[in-house]
Image (spheres, rainbow, N blue to C red):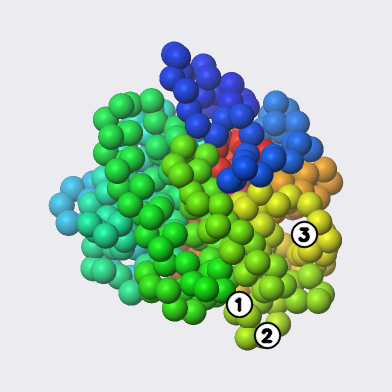
Amino acid sequence: MKSINRRRWLAAQTTGLALSGLGGARLLGQEAKPARVDPERAGAELITPNAQRAINRALQYLSRKQIKVGRGKGAYGNSGYSSGVATCSLAGLGFMAAGNPPGQGPYGKNVDLCIEYILACTQESGFITGINGASNDQMYGHGFATLFLAEVYGMSLRENIGEMVGKKLRKAVELICKCQNDQGGWRYQPTKSSADLSITICQIMALRAAHEAGITVPIEVRNKCVEYVKKSQNGDGSFRYTLSGGGGTFPLTAAGIVALYSAGIYEGEDIDKAIKWLERQGTSSSHGHYYYGQYYAIQAMWQAGGEHWRKWYTGMREKMIKEQQSDGSWNDPSIGPEFGTGAGLIIMNMPNNYLPVFSK
């Protein structure tokens, strides 16, 4: 698919249908930061022929691995992380980031299978968890699944998708809001207990996507989350796991920046310090949960714009081309190749700006 701006791409397929979130990224009344990357040229310039070949191989890998019939239809396995809604949702977002909205494009049917699985995993309470009630999903998976449903809801041109997804998306959003704890964050269980940043980022990003798709999100939830995230930052600019203390990590620092972006905060000393901290760490594979961390880091640099963005993306692009496995996957040893490949597709396709949640 030719690289074009996401807004033009969607507009070309839309006949009078208003899609939420196409006028720039806002969350709960916050003004969007002006784009500092030219989205009309970024894709054509940055997604090289070698990068596109890597993207095509990754798409083929995820398509092959997806369960097409029977138990777990739409998922990527029947046990462990591969069976989780987080992996399925990230794969769905990966297909969409490459220009395949629900039911359209070469991999639109794969997106539909992801939707089918996520909807089947949505409980009456609104909690979304895998076919086995997978313990490794919890609120982590719920956040990714809610984000995926919100992007589907905002991008699909089919009324039946809106009807199917809308009701369950609203319940999923309501559950997130109800489970926010007094500190302003979220933890693994869908209850008001403790909080950590790795779970909190999943929820605030999902809420931002839902808001962009036209779902009501209380301003109080956003404000409490901002307080929590800011308190999670260390003096050196890094972000830590919980408020109780500890050193910062690469994935958490990238997540902290994106959490603030998702809440509509694009500038400030806290963000500048965190960006500089990430840049000092670089794109080294020594970071734990590598593709999970880079999934957030690429978003952080995309919004930072300018040379922050271009230098980071070109470095990651070449690194990922070299590290792609022979079967087309990118393997994250901590989580698995399906998750790593979904994250990798989002990273590699970021210049195309197809997903509304990444809009500026």
Name the residue rendered at 42%, 74% in the picture.
192
Callout 3, which amino acid?
Ile
Say whether disc 1 or disc 3 marks the residue closer to the N-terminus: 1
Q: Depth check: give the residue in front, 350 or 300.
A: 300
Q: Residue 76 appears in which quarter of the rendering? A: bottom left
Q: Which residue is mark 2?
A: 246
Residue 34 can be seen in this image: yes
- 287 left or right, relative to 99: right
- 228 left or right, relative to 86: right
Give the Cα separation between the discs numbered 1 and 3. Answer: 17 Å
Name the residue rendered at 60%, 77% in the picture.
241
Q: Secondary structure at mark 2?
A: loop
Q: Depth check: give the residue in front, 226 or 1.
A: 226
**Contact? badges 3 and 2 (CB < 8 Å):** no
- 77 left or right, relative to 286: left
Residue 317 lies, in percent from the top left, at: 67, 49
Number of numbered labels in the structure image: 3
Name the residue rendered at 73%, 50% in the picture.
266
**Which numbered circle lies on residue 141?**
none
Callout 1, which amino acid?
Tyr
Q: Secondary structure at mark 1?
A: loop
Give the Cα separation between the discs numbered 2 and 1. Answer: 7 Å
**Contact? badges 2 and 1 (CB < 8 Å):** yes
Residue 337 lies, in percent from the top left, at: 45, 61
Q: Which residue is mark 1?
A: 241
Callout 2, which amino acid?
Gly
**Contact? badges 1 and 3 (CB < 8 Å):** no
Residue 356 lies, in percent from the top left, at: 55, 38
Q: Which residue is mark 3?
A: 271
